[in-house]
Amino acid sequence: MYNVVLQPLSAGDQNGPGIHYKIYWRRKGGETEFQTQVLKELGNVGMAVVKVQHKYYYTEYEVKVQAMNNVGSGPESEISTIFSAEDMPQVAPSTVSAVSYNSTALNVSWIPIDQTREKIRGKLIGHRLKYWKEDGREEDAVYYLSRSTKPWSLIVGLQPNTNYYVKVMAYNAAGEGPESERFLERTYMNAPQKPPSSVHIYVIDPSTVRVVWRYVAPSQNEEPLIGYKVRVWEKDQDMSTANDTIVKIGRNLEAYITGLSPGKVYNMRVLAYSNGGDGRMSSPALTFQMGDPAALKSGSSSIFSHFTIISQILFSILIWKSLQL
């Protein structure tokens, strides 16, 4: 079936009582003569439903409408092309697999479905993912709707170090298709639960600072550390604008943050990370201001870096003394 939507005639255009409509339709490229249906009993309606054979799902039709009243018939409208209703997909995604993304998410992927009319039976809108714990019941599965035609999706909000079964279905406007084969995957263990401690900042030059901290020891239910992130952003900006400096495990517990602007105020936090995800950040955020660039003008007999720490935590501050030229 398909719906024909039209703009009903206003009272001034009806030119008589008994207004109703006549619908014309034919399969585009397959029929030469129009089929018709008079909707006299429906009156001045704005939509009509025309039933066609099921095998003509998601098929192009040419339609036109003619207004009629008790006096006679009006002119026919121009021909419009529409699609009949979609049917549900007939195939399932194949070769479904999943890998752990972090401690609470799985990255699920599959081979894309051939988007032909016979297989999708409409227009592919996205995919529906079904997942449940290995020790749970499939009847209690949770569904996630991915409105994307890409052959992968991220399932989030899972429990760490837990096995999950996953199935995938394609869906269109008519509904979802058959389920894929299930795939079993385990999420990573927890991300680091402790933040780095004893974080200190030292000035190096007017645009560079050195940051040091203490080692974070992961517990038995946490993934091994991969490294640390030193997160710096301007104080008047949101943390989403921050730049991360990565320090991998095995290196010294320090980072040099370069490219800072003299006179600007920054926030800084440090965190450990692993395959389980980002760990807790040091708290509170450390706020610092680089030196005044006016003190660095050429010709000065001394160079100063006014480095201000605005925090409740005590920092070590290095100030260059006069350098004789």
Image (tube, rainbow, N blue to C red):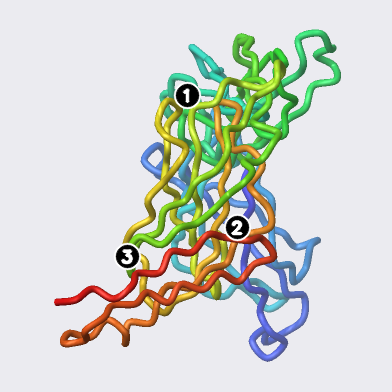
Percent position of residue 205, x then y = 32, 65
The C terminus lies in which quarter of the figure? bottom left
Considering the numbered disc 2 on the image, is that residue within a helix, a strand or a loop?
A: strand
Q: Which sits in the foreground, 165 or 302?
A: 302
Residue that numbered label 2 is attached to: 23
- The structure residue drawn at horizontal position 69% and vertical position 36%, both measured from the top left corner, is 194
Instruction: Give the CA distance from mark 3 to mark 1.
Output: 67 Å
Considering the numbered disc 3 on the image, is that residue within a helix, a strand or a loop?
A: strand
Percent position of residue 224, x then y = 57, 20
Considering the numbered disc 1 on the image, is that residue within a helix, a strand or a loop?
A: helix
Q: Amino acid at mark 2?
A: Ile
Q: Would residue 87 be visible to someone looking at this image?
A: no
Percent position of residue 69, x then y = 70, 75
Q: Are marks 1 and 2 in contact (CB under 8 Å)?
A: no
Q: Would residue 71 be visible to someone looking at this image?
A: yes
Q: Are marks 2 and 3 in contact (CB under 8 Å)?
A: no
- Vertical comparison of 71 with 311: above or below: below
Q: Amino acid at mark 3?
A: Asp
Q: Which sits in the foreground, 38 or 122?
A: 122
Q: Which sits in the foreground, 272 or 35?
A: 272
Q: Quadrant of residue 177?
A: top right
- The structure residue drawn at horizontal position 57% and vertical position 33%, both measured from the top left corner, is 215
Residue that numbered label 1 is attached to: 118
Residue that numbered label 3 is attached to: 205
Query: Pointer 2: residues within 10 angstroms few (<14), some, or many (20+)?
Result: many
Q: Amino acid at mark 1?
A: Glu
Q: Upstream in the sequence, badge 1 or badge 2?
A: 2
Query: Pointer 1: residues within 10 angstroms few (<14), some, or many (20+)?
Result: some
Which of the labelled discs sits on residue 237, or is there none?
A: none
